[in-house]
């Protein structure tokens, strides 16, 4: 499928996020298709994302929204123990958008993480120039296989064809192999980019 020729999501975020806390490391794990001007944000607001992970995810969102500019459109979904639609498409720039997202993400879940309903909802938007941006630590109450199968099925149901899914992974503690594998496969199987934030003393999956 064809995507608009715009700056890749990773480059846009890099230009806006040069200064991070010295204890954190930001790495490009995979480059993907360019981010389009219409995108759905899928935000992990489960218990494991509280604190610094959510803040780093927010920084990435600021960069993405800045890249989209004056003619972008965004729709947001939040998931944890349940999932919620932010309330329809919003035209950028929107002065209240980040304030509303901040308030939304401050609502604490029970710690359970059900990603599938939110991803299915995001992929049900029938736009030909859609991108999906997922912010998560990859910890899911569903199995990796179930998540990947649900995403594949939702992509196949799209009348406008599959769309790229870009992933921003944030790990405050060393991630386990299942979490790393999930975010890698979501990005790889759906033509998306993958950016990871982790503590500098984190040597990898444990």
Image (tube, rainbow, N blue to C red):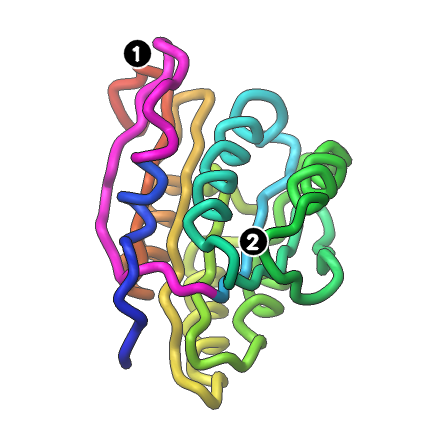
Say which quadrant the C terminus sits in. Answer: top left
In this view, 187 is above or below 109: below
User: Is 53 displayed left or right of 168 in the figure?
Assistant: right
The answer to which quarter of the image holds residue 74 is bottom right
Secondary structure mostly taken by the magenta-highlighted segment of the chain? loop
Q: Residues within 10 Å of mark 2 (few under 14, many from 20)?
A: many
Note whether 43 is above or below 127 in the view shown: above
Residue range of the region highlighted in magenta in the rendering: 15-37
In the image, 153 versus 21, the foreground residue is 21
Point out residue 29 in the picture as x, y percentages from the top left corner. Answer: 24, 41
| Residue identifier under label 2 | 42
Task: Provide residue 165's location: percent of width, then percent of height.
Answer: 39, 61
Task: Please provide percent x and percent y for residue 132.
Answer: 46, 61
Measuring 47% from the left and 45% from the top, which residue is drawn there?
66
For this rendering, which residue is in front, 26 or 116? Answer: 26
Q: Which residue is more in the foreground, 109 or 64?
A: 64
Q: Where is residue 99, by image quadrant?
A: top right
Which residue is found at the position 62% from the left and 45% from the top? 113
Which label number is shown at residue 113? none
Residue on which the image places disc 1: 201
Q: Please say whether residue 172 is one of the residues in the magenta stretch.
A: no
């Amino acid at each position: 499928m064809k995507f608009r020729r715009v700056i890749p999501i990773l480059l846009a975020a890099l230009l806006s996020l040069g200064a991070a806390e010295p204890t954190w490391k930001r790495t490009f794990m995979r480059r993907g298709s360019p981010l389009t001007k219409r995108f759905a944000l899928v935000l992990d607001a489960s218990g494991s994302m509280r604190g610094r992970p959510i803040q780093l995810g927010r920084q990435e969102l600021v960069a993405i929204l800045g890249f989209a500019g004056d003619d972008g459109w965004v729709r947001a979904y939040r998931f944890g123990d349940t999932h919620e639609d932010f309330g329809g498409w919003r035209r950028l720039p929107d002065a209240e958008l980040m304030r509303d997202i901040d308030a939304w993400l401050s609502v604490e879940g029970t710690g359970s993480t059900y990603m599938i309903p939110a991803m299915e909802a995001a992929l049900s938007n029938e736009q030909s120039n859609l991108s999906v941006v997922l912010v998560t630590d990859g910890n899911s109450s569903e199995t990796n296989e179930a998540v990947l199968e649900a995403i594949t099925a939702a992509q196949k149901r799209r009348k406008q064809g599959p769309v790229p899914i870009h992933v921003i992974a944030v790990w405050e503690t060393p991630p386990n192999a299942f979490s790393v594998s999930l975010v890698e496969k979501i990005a790889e199987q759906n033509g998306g980019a993958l950016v990871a934030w982790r503590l500098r003393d984190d040597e990898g999956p444990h």
